[in-house]
Amino acid sequence: MKSEHGSTEIPPPSMSRSASKSIERVNTFRFRPTEDSDSGDEVSRAQSNRKSSYTTKSSGACVHCKSLKVRCEFGSGENACRRCQAGNILCQSRSRKKRKAAPTHEDLQERAHSQDCQIQSLLLQLDQMRMEKKIQALIAHAYPKSSSRGSDDASKYIQLKRGVENSPELVVASYFSPDRSISVLSPPDIVRYCCLYPRDITELFTIFFEKINPFFSILDPELHTPQNLIWTCPFLFTVICATASRYCASKAALYSLAKDFAREAAGQALVDGAKKIDICQAYLLLGVYPSPKKKWVEDRSWLLMGVAIRMALELELNLPPPSDCDEREALNRTRTWLNCYCVDGSHAIQFGKMPMLRLDDYMARTSQNWYRSSSMNTPYDVHLVAYVQILIIMAQWRATVQQENNSEKNLDVVQFAVETERQLSKEWSLWFARYEEEYVRNPFILCYYRANTTEMITAYLRLVVLATGFQDAFKSGISRESGVLRRSIDAARTVIQIMVDRLYPTGYLKYAMEANFLYVSFSAAYLLNLLRPKLLPLIDENLQEEIILTVKRLIHVLGSEDVALDGRHTPALYSKFLVNLLSKYNARSNRRSETPPDGIRFHPQFNDERHTSPPGWPDIQQVGGLTETGAGHTLSEYEPGIVYQQAGDADMDFSLGHFVRIVSELPVNQYNLNADPNVWNEQWPGVSGWSPQFNC
């Protein structure tokens, strides 16, 4: 170590090596040689040599020494550390890791798109898992373990789950696609899980348009084809297949599952919020042909009808078709709206409520000649228009009665009922003449069937009006010669006679709408009510026997295998209801009468003494005193042969709405639908040919 005067300064022995190096660095910094001195040149050369030696060696330990967490020791002029040389290891210097380049905007967009696709794929898988779970629940509901009727369909479902070649959805997608190639669109779920191949779909559509649509006449077979509906409106496609499957022998076991798919499609259509004429028609079909329920109160047909009518209003089907609408589509719009009007009017009459649609609806009032407005009209449009005109008369009658009930005016209900009944009969006569003209041009058996159906509906509506008049006349006193009584009995017998003698022999009765069986059941219940002890003086013994035989023939028809598809079918349920109602008047005396033609011995019992009326329709409550119309009479003043409502008698409601409510409150299983056919035949030997298979 040099001093300030250039002499070497020896550090004291007590100074450590590190301290001496620090003093040396300080002295080097404090005494820099000038550029002209030789010592300065030597120092510069030494510093450059050290700098060059540093550049050949990396800072820090090599890879091997770093792994041992020790420093490298280099010999003079060597590039490898001593430890690596001793271990004969390649001495590699550690290099800094290369930093990744920042992603560009395009890279970020591509990454985000990839993540979105992955999320969508996961959501799709989740939806598929939920759908599979829901399908399994539907299958378990449609085919319980205790039932063997769905075993074949369940096995098909399992095979499809395992991946059978030529699965229905692939075949259908290829068959119904425009270019006959595998379409990217997926067919409705009913195709896959009900194993519907193109031949099955064609068969179901044929059954629907040949045997079901003529009774409702809402769809055009030229417009509503499976090739079109399977992609444009899967909801309507599903409803058509589900409805027709009940009447197809090879697909009857699929009905429960297919109907569940139709209900799922109905709910999904509400969630999606789509508004189309096809969707409106699908809701109407579901309401007119509902699924069997264990209780009538569980039926939700009215809700589906309401959705259809509301959607029709939003689609402006109540207005004339737009000018840019083609001819077939214009007919489709009008036909759909007229069906909505009929469904709304029929529902309002059944449940005693005001209709949703206006009484002065323009399309309904001006539709008298619509059925022949185009060459594309179907042969069944004339029956639709006739029903509309008859319902207009009924709507006017109900509006008048409702208005008079809310006012202080006293309306002669009996006289007004008779006048309305005559107006209905006259309207039917006018349309019967038109039917004959149309039948000459279209001599189809179903056109003849529809004409009889319209006559039956007209007679049923006549009975609804006259039953109201009979109820009012009974309070003030009614006799056998009463016009409203005779007309009501004639109307009720006409309804039953048309179904038993005209409709039943055609073989098409099992395809009829549910409401037709309500009409005839109401008529039979009205006649049976006249057999109660209180009202028996109003009819003679011959008429009593005729009523019994007529109702029993109807029970046989409704419960026969040619009409009732199974124990849950509506005609079978009404037949059991009528059996229970008829049993209230079974013979209990030794009075002799002739044996009915069908071999059933069943006679009403009538004694001169008063009996308490049996509970049920049309009873509603007990009358505590005389009615206002009979308040001026005493029991001794009553004329013989005239029946009055007296104190203690049950007040009766003959309206159709009350009848529907009574029927709706009765559970289906109350009718003992699982009864042994042998027991049934012992109780009713005259209908021994009927052996229903009730599976409720």
Image (tube, rainbow, N blue to C red):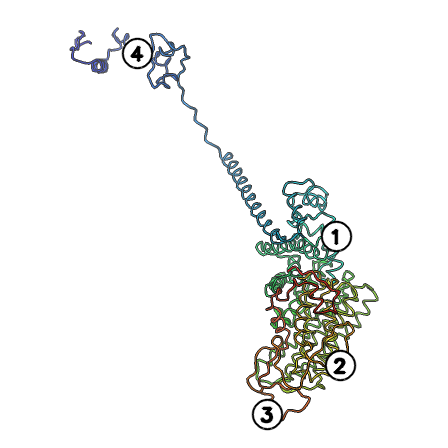
Q: Is residue 56 left or right of residue 358?
A: left
Q: Is disc 4 placed on a helix, strand or loop?
A: helix
Distance (Cα) linking label 4 and label 2: 142 Å
Judging from the image, what secondary structure is the residue with disc 2 in?
helix
> Residue 440 — which label?
none
Residue, far bottom? 637
Mark 2 lies on residue: 542
Residue at which label 1 appears = 203
Q: Give the crowd class for mark 3: few <14, some 14-19, many >=20 residues within 10 Å.
A: few
Measure the alpha-carbon separation of dots 3 and 2: 34 Å
Looking at marks 4 and 2 on the same chain, the residue that comes earlier in the sequence is marked by 4
In depth, the one of 510 and 394 nearer the eye is 510
Q: Mark 2: which amino acid? A: Asn
Q: Secondary structure at mark 3?
A: loop
**Residue 263's quadrant in the figure?**
bottom right
Residue 383 location (% of width, % of height): 75, 67
Q: Residues within 10 Å of mark 1 (few under 14, many from 20)?
A: some
Q: Earlier in the sequence, mark 1 or mark 3?
A: 1
Give the total of numbered labels: 4
Marks 1 & 4, CB-CB < 8 Å contact: no
Q: Mark number for residue 47? A: 4
Q: Secondary structure at mark 1?
A: helix
- The N terminus: image quadrant: top left
